[in-house]
Amino acid sequence: MKKSVLVALLLSLATLDAGAQNNDQQDTSFKPSGELYGYVFGDYAFKFQTDEQKRGAQQYSGLKKDYSSFNIRRLYLQYRYRFTPVISSHITLAHESGTEANSNRTDLLPDGNRSIFVKHAYIQFDQVISRAAIVLGQQATPTFSRLSETIWHYRSIEKTVTDMRGISASSDLGLGVYGKIGKKERWGYDVLYANNSGTKFITDTHKKLYTSLYTYFFDKKLVVQVNYEYNRTLPFSNISGNTQLVKAFMGYETAQTSVGVEVFKQFNKNATLYRHAAGAVNSFSARNTAAGISAFYTGTIQSEKLNFFARIDWFNPDTNFKPDRFYSEGYPSAKELFATIGVDYEPVKNIHFMPNLWLNHYESKSINRLNTPKNGSDIVGRVTFYYLFNK
């Protein structure tokens, strides 16, 4: 009830305050207008090596050796419209490619054509709260889209670690407040209360709280951010649980280079079922704790023409794993390491060609006292293309 009252109050304030500003502070030079813009990225990819166990759920997981393809991995068509100097709206229609070996791909229509979905659809009110924006609708979450992804720069190469490992959504439907603190705006905060259904239609009534606090140093070249997220879950029919995410990011960025480190832990209460012995009747639920760390570095080789990038991630799907338990089917069987390296050639502004190497390595665990599978890797060579328009 308190949350419902808070949402209603914020909406009322937004409506009343925005209306008052329109009446009291008319800008006669302003004319409502909109702009269309967007971008596309994809690749030619060739798979040099494949994991024999076909583990993982990434772009090239499960594909055979010597597989090759041209693919569009993302297409964004965006439109922004300003109703007044302080009220605007934003719509993004998107195609995003899924795991290419998956026979039940949600990124394709039944006839095999690429699907388009609503990635963003929101209205934004500025100046209702000092140095802040109130956003209502389908919007980018504070987890990575608003800060760490922008300093990494190379979403066209790969998602950030929390996005890549499915730890949190990049977009959700709800009410958000995004602001800065103080005249110099060295501190900032993000709060989003949303459906926890990503871009899909809501499937239950449990909402998710996203929060972020960050601060800048050294003329805003260095930023430090901490995130906390919480939502209730129903992992099994008669058991309730919750998920909590704690994440920290530190990034340093200049005109020539960017460096970043991102670490997270996600605590999933009652997320895993296990038995004390093979074939035992009684099963028990346990906490699953996922953890990861990512480090990247980008730099300039030739100004405005040639850059390079490198990144390495470590991911453990469950730090609470115990070898004497007998886990239910589907329990994650390996730790994973991701790495990429490449160069970014920009012959014309906003047109990029990026030769790169993509690797995901699997370090096996012995599950349910079975023989431990061999370690393995998926290794892919790519030439990525990326272009932006009206940017």
Image: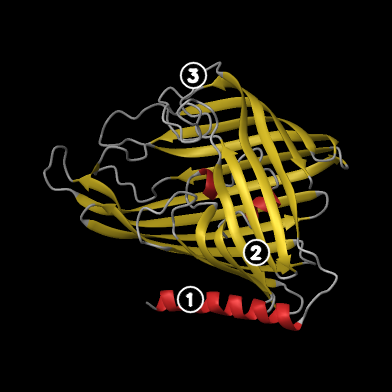
Closest to the observer, 7 or 256: 7
Q: Which residue carries the number 2 mark?
A: 224
Label 2 SS: strand
Residue 37 pos. (x, y %): 73, 46
Q: Is mark 3 on a helix, strand or loop?
A: loop
Q: Which of marks 1 and 3 is nearer the N terminus?
A: 1
Q: Is residue 194 left or right of residue 124?
A: left
**Type of residue at label 3?**
Lys
User: Would residue 209 be seen by someone viewing this image from the given angle?
Assistant: yes
The N terminus lies in which quarter of the figure? bottom left
Q: Which comes before the other along the chain, label 1 or label 2?
A: 1
Marks 1 and 2 sit apart, C-alpha to C-alpha, by 32 Å
Q: In which quarter of the image is residue 329?
A: top left
Q: Position of residue 220 (x, y in %)?
A: 76, 65
Dot 1 surroundings within 10 Å: few (below 14), some, or many (20 or more)? few
In x, y percent, where is residue 98? Answer: 51, 34
Alpha-carbon neighbours of circle 2 within 10 Å: few (<14), some, or many (≥20)?
Answer: many
Q: Nearer the viewer, residue 273 or 351?
A: 351
Vertical order, 384 against 289 (above or below): above
Whole-number angstrom distance, CA of label 3 to CA of label 2: 41 Å
Residue farthest along the left direction in this orientation: 281
**Residue 14 vs residue 352: left or right?**
left
Q: How is the image coloured?
A: secondary structure
Q: Give whichever of discs 3 and 2 has the lower sequence position.
A: 3
| Residue lying at the far right of the rendered structure | 303
Say above or below: 119 vs 87.
above
The residue pinned by badge 1 equals 8
Asked if 20 appears above or below 357 in the picture, the reply is: below
What residue is shown at x 40% (from left), y 78% (from top)? 2
Reading the image, the residue beneath label 3 is 64
* Of marks 1 and 2, the one in the foreground: 1
Residue in view at x 13 percent, y 48 percent: 282
